[in-house]
Amino acid sequence: MMYRFLIVDDEYYIRQHIRCCIPWENYDFQYAGEASSVSQAMEFLEHNGVELILLDISMPGQSGMDLLKLLDAKKRPHVIILTGFATFEYAREALKYGVSDYLLKPIKPETLTDAVISLKETLDRENNRTKALLQLEWTSAVIEQEIQRNFFRSLYTGHVPARGEELLETYGIRPSSRYIVLILDTISKDKQNKHNGQKQADRLAMNNCAEQILSPFGFYLITPDGYGRSVIILEGLPSSISGQELTDLVQKLVKERFHLSLLSGYSISASGKAGDILAAYQNSLQFFWLRTIYGETIDVSQVFMPSLPVLDSLTALNNRLRLDLSGKQDTAVLRVLDKIFLLMKKHLFPIHALESEIVSLMGIAIHHAAERHLDILSSENDWNSLSCTDLIQSGLRLEEIKETFARLFSAFMRDQEQGDHHFIEEVVLQSQKIIDRDFAKACLSLNTIASELLISPSYLSRSFTKIQGISLTSYITKCRMEHARDLLQHTEMTIAQISEQSGYSDLFYFSKRFKSFWGVSPSRYRLTGASDMEVNKED
């Protein structure tokens, strides 16, 4: 780092001598300027920052002592006093102001060099101390922010943490006040990749706009919930604006600046107590999804659990759908699907009832596909990245959810004549992709892969062995062992770190598996390389 210095002396030749008598750059100092009087020095310092002032203590008019008195003690640069024998005692008085050193005129290069080297060491220590303090402050702020986020994530999932009321007050939420709880999220343009960097950037832009709108209204807090949506807790609103109008203001600003659309829902808490904040969040979330699925103009007060006759009609339609799928009645299937979604829209099914019907439709689809070995994983159906929760929480309208099922069932009609070999190959291919992606996760297993692919573990196991000639579990082990071998060969990571990076949380078990697979222990392989390696062919 280069430090800047200013020379203050009324004699021109002395200023030039100081500037040129030593190689300042060799000691990490850079000439910033010079002044012949205190007034010139003050004017310079108002517009320029320096770390060092070389100051003549005795000048016509105001002296160097006057400049020391004018400088802010907290922001004062380091000062080296320049003095003659006649003013030596005067210079000693200047030391009370914290000057770093004093030099007798005429200035000798070696004396100036020693003073500059000493000062550089001091400046380096100060910089390192400042950097360490800034790093500590930043780390503390990050930790505090993460503690706060974890607290609210836990609260929003229904688990009121210990000392919940006390922590809420720490974060500025008073138990005696009422709060608007507003949920906001951006609508992803790419619904197949909702959690990518662009989604995070969109949410950051949304939060920045929300803060601009909220700042005039007093206290507010923005934290993410477990799905990354922004939850805004705002202490009241003036009677001149409603929660909906506040949401509209944020939406308008986000639209104008970033061309983004938002999903929203809000509610008002009975108090600032943890249970009431949670209840308001849950109400806001219901509002959020209902407005998303049915449209912004929905009257939430009209949403009730459907009556028994309506549920009976829904059951009859589901049974009809199963029969038409079995009979390969393409037109009939789509017609029944239309009736199902029209029924839910007409009677404004609440979220849990919608989820229940989507689960039923998924069950019908999975059962039908399993019976006929149909390709439920085809990317053209948007199926391999969707679940019941995704369909409800992906920002799709009810009509779009229906179209998702329509594409799926239409694909069934096209694919039913194909044999199951293609399906088996696709299952194995998808499972290999999952393994290649997730083999470093200790939780990866036959059951987790089968669950992600929506097939039974036994069917996946048989299919994988049939196509690959080895069991799926052996393939996982192979991927992990090859990865561990590469890390041992090409990195300086510890064996414990390599164990974790290879999907094993237990170091002893990892070492045992490595030796069983390769014929040598990890530590032995790191010492000898491949010369002692003998691949174990056992599954």
Image (cartoon, grey):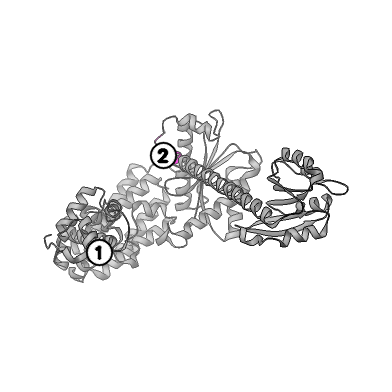
- Let me know if residue 323 appears in the view: no
Main secondary structure type of the part rendered in magenta: helix
Left/right placement of residue 521 relative to residue 158 reads left
Residue extending furthest toward the top: 176
Q: Position of residue 137 (x, y in %)?
A: 54, 43
Q: Position of residue 226 (x, y in %)?
A: 42, 46
User: Dot 2 lies on which element?
Assistant: helix
Which contiguous range is marked in magenta? 151-159
Numbered label attached to residue 154: 2
Residue name at image x 44 percent, y 43 percent: 303
Q: Residues within 10 Å of mark 2 (few under 14, many from 20)?
A: some
Q: Is residue 152 one of those drawn in magenta? A: yes
Q: Residues within 10 Å of mark 1 (few under 14, many from 20)?
A: some
Residue 135 vertical position relative to residue 430 in the rendered view, above or below: above
Amino acid at pointer 2 = Ser
Lower position in the chain sequence, tag 2 or tag 1: 2
Left/right placement of residue 17 relative to residue 323 reads right
Report the residue marked by disc 1: 432
Left/right placement of residue 110 relative to residue 198 reads right
Left/right placement of residue 97 relative to residue 375 reads right
User: Dot 1 lies on which element?
Assistant: helix
